[in-house]
Amino acid sequence: MYLRIGELARRTGLTVRALRHYDDIGLLVPSQRSDGGYRLYDRNDVARLYRIQALRRLDLSLAEIQGLLDRAADGLSEVVAQQLSQLEREITQATALRTHLLTLQAQLQARTEPAIDDWLVALERTVAGAKYFSDDELGRLQTGRDGFADAVAPERAELTVVLRALVAEGASPESAQAQALAQRWIALLLEEAGGDEALLMQLYAMHWNEPALHSLTGVDRAGMQFISHAMAYARLQRYAAHCDAAEMALLAQHYVAQTDAWPPLIADVRQQMRQGAAPDSAPVRVLAARWQALSLAKAGGDAVLNAKLQEAFRSDPALRAGSGIDAPLAAYIGRAIAQLADPQSL
């Protein structure tokens, strides 16, 4: 029995384009061609396709998959071991999720509405969490929430109501009320993250990118942006202790305008650092150049003021709190920027 490419695509959920590509690169060459030149796949071809798709689940490249299949049993034995290891991790995650969902179910059956944080944990462990956190990081977040989420739930709910009202009425994030709210909001998140600036930024990224979390928390992107801008105004005031009047006037024109560009840049740099990329590698050089340009832009292009801001940031813990920039990341990006200025490193 032979299957034509369209039938094989329909029954496997793959696209005809993908199957043609597999043929073009020699990964899955159909055993036969019809008189009209159509690709025809037999049972051995389908079996090979099954193995290809199984290996794709391990995030291997097509070239790596082809190499493993060409080495037959030796390569596949290693892959099976990796698959078993991955399956064991998934079982552990699923078991933890099942325990948590059983608790939610018991609360619902008792007509007790679970807290927002209980729903967040469930969502993080199913959809969002795996995209932003390792198993260890999810465990640390859960530990941070234990005994903490319930205690701060009333305050967090009150802050959410105030935040939504401020956003709805078009209030300025520069106001004293907005700055106080933002600082408390970030303090609670940072405490939940165990004081870990990296986890804080991952929480920010997850809440920014996942609409399902917006509906659960009641805080959407507009609310998050309001908090970020209010925090920028709060930091701007702290720089007054380090700058003269003319410098503060320049900062007032440029500092807050750069706020939205920082979180994704910090996330990109941290991702490179987590992956072990060298500070002088090409991707990190690009990020370092962006970092340098953004730092100068918030100082209105004044290099002397920019240097003063950097020194203030290093020396003042209040400026660093909630920024997503901890000592390891600051050192990493500092080395990358130093490489940009070193002609011998080019």
Image: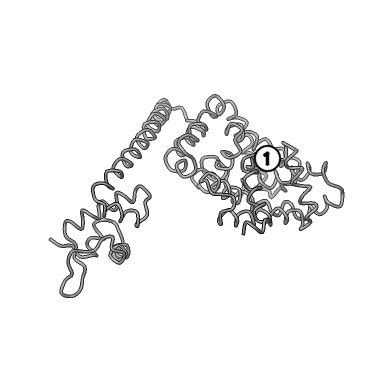
Residue named by callout 1: 182
Q: Secondary structure at mark 1?
A: helix
The residue at the point 30 percent across, 58 percent down is 14
- Left or right placement of residue 66 versus residue 304 in this view: left
- Left or right placement of residue 42 versus residue 292 in this view: left
Give the residue type at disc 1.
Answer: Ala
Residue 19 higher or lower than 212, as above or below: below
In the foreground, 122 or 166: 122
Q: Quadrant of residue 85?
A: top left
Residue 131 higher or lower than 304, as above or below: above
Q: Which quadrant is the N terminus positioned in? A: bottom left
Q: Quadrant of residue 126?
A: top left
Q: Position of residue 267 (x, y in %)?
A: 57, 47
- Left or right placement of residue 210 versus residue 64 in this view: right
Assess disc 1: are there few (<14), some (14-19) or many (≥20) residues with their C-alpha within 10 Å of its C-alpha.
many
Q: Position of residue 88 (x, y in %)?
A: 34, 35
Q: Position of residue 276 (x, y in %)?
A: 52, 45
Q: Quadrant of residue 158?
A: top right
Q: Residue furthest bottom?
A: 36
In the foreground, 278 or 135: 278
How many numbered discs sit on the rendered protein?
1
Q: Residue furthest right?
A: 245
